[in-house]
Image (tube, rainbow, N blue to C red):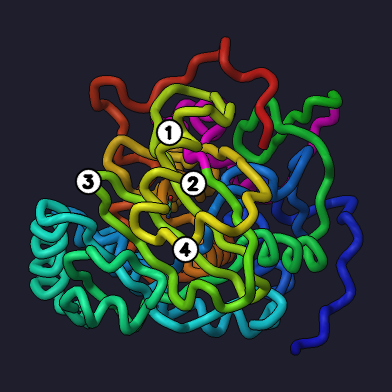
Amino acid sequence: MPEVPAKPDVPTKPDVIVVGGGIIGLSAAWQLNQEGADVVVLDPAPGTGASHAAAGMLAPIHEAYWGESHILRLNMAASRAWPAFAESLGADAVDYRRNGMLMAAYDADDKALLDNLGDLHEQEGLPVERLRSRECRSREPLLAPGVRGGVYSPLDHQANPRRVVAELLRRVPTIPVSATEVTGNRVVADDGRVLVCQQVVVAAGAWTGRLLGVPIRPIKGQILRLSGPVGLLRLPVRGVVRGSSVYAVPRSDGEIVVGATQEEQGFDTRVTAGGVYELLRDVLALLPGLSEIDLVETWAGLRPGAPDNAPIIGTGDDGIVYATGHYRNGILTAPITAAAVSALVQGREPPIDLAAFSPNRFDAKPGGHTTDPESLSGVPA
Ligand code: GLY
């Protein structure tokens, strides 16, 4: 377990202000801090947005989709960065586990879909094992006897995002305000304060669109937390159940996170009867043994999504460093985003090619980068 360094005081003259205290902003701030920058994060309630809803699957292979090779490359680089990131925070402290992940098909049509995904994995050279029904159940005995088959990826891993955020908050100074306006190296906060620094980094998740006009939209995910005996579910399982996707991620304390809906309806974080029903229906079809354990929490968060589903990481024409739009992979890509942001701020070559993730890629496109002054108020960072 690494010793937790003394948390720096809030700097009176910060070198860097990070707007947004989710896992992306906090990781970037911590990386900058480790490299000697005086940094502060602005957020009225750090870690309570998308990071609080996330299950923490570090699953570039199971999140791979057709036509997204550039995102896959980023996600694979992020996956390789995770072990060192987890070690630096304390692997046990963040419940980091490397036990692979199983994707399982409920019926014959779901199996056809998984077979297609298996083809994609092979085409991309990803290490996966295709499993028959019985092989799935011997890896994860809680699976329903009827599952048709699956794909196991030994490289996918997991961590508890709430614990990651808690560890980062022990290391990074924060000010509990929202940014209402960001221009160049100046941030106006909702308490009237104007803060000036050398470099602003915006990591405001789904709210980045309102703040800076980039085309980021909120994509709601409802989740459930169940609690049962430790080890009841051995592996994180992602299921395709009658065409719908559901996952169950076990923690080392017996908690199981079940997620997640995917809903495009603006800034709505209501937990709905329909959302909870859908998750329970699908997860219990796949893992019937979970019906006996406690349902301890329902929650909803907003993933930040760009039109092309790729994150926005880079310096904008406005001079601001953007780190947002991580969509389904914010937890996975936090360490690599942090390293990239730090390199950009310090004028070094980023550790990955950021060309496809530029904030300027939407300019001059219909419906692209526009600023709506009406929407600049009340931005929860
Ligand atoms: N990465 C899982 C999700 O976004 O639901």
Q: Residue 60, percent across and down?
A: 34, 67
- Placement of 181 over or under 291, stated as above or below: above
The kind of secondary structure element at disc 4 is helix
Q: Which residue is mark 1?
A: 216
Measuring 73% from the left and 65% from the top, which residue is drawn there?
168
> What are the residue bounds of the magenta stretch?
193-222
Residues under numbered marks 4 and 1 in contact, where contact means CB atoms less than 8 Å apart: no
For residue 199, side relative to residue 110 (left or right)? right
* Depth order, front residue of 95/286: 286
The kind of secondary structure element at disc 3 is loop
Inter-mark Cα distance, 3 to 4: 19 Å
Residue 337 can be seen in this image:
no
Inter-mark Cα distance, 2 to 3: 32 Å
- Placement of 372 over or under 34, stated as above or below: above
Q: Which residue is mark 3?
A: 242
Q: Amino acid at mark 1?
A: Ile
Inter-mark Cα distance, 4 to 2: 38 Å
Sequence-first disc among 3 and 4: 3
Numbered tag placed on residue 324 in the rendering: 2
* Depth order, front residue of 197/365: 365
- Placement of 111 over or under 297, stated as above or below: below
Q: Is mark 2 within 8 Å of ligand 1?
A: no
Measuring 50% from the left and 60% from the top, which residue is drawn there?
290
Sequence-first disc among 1 and 3: 1
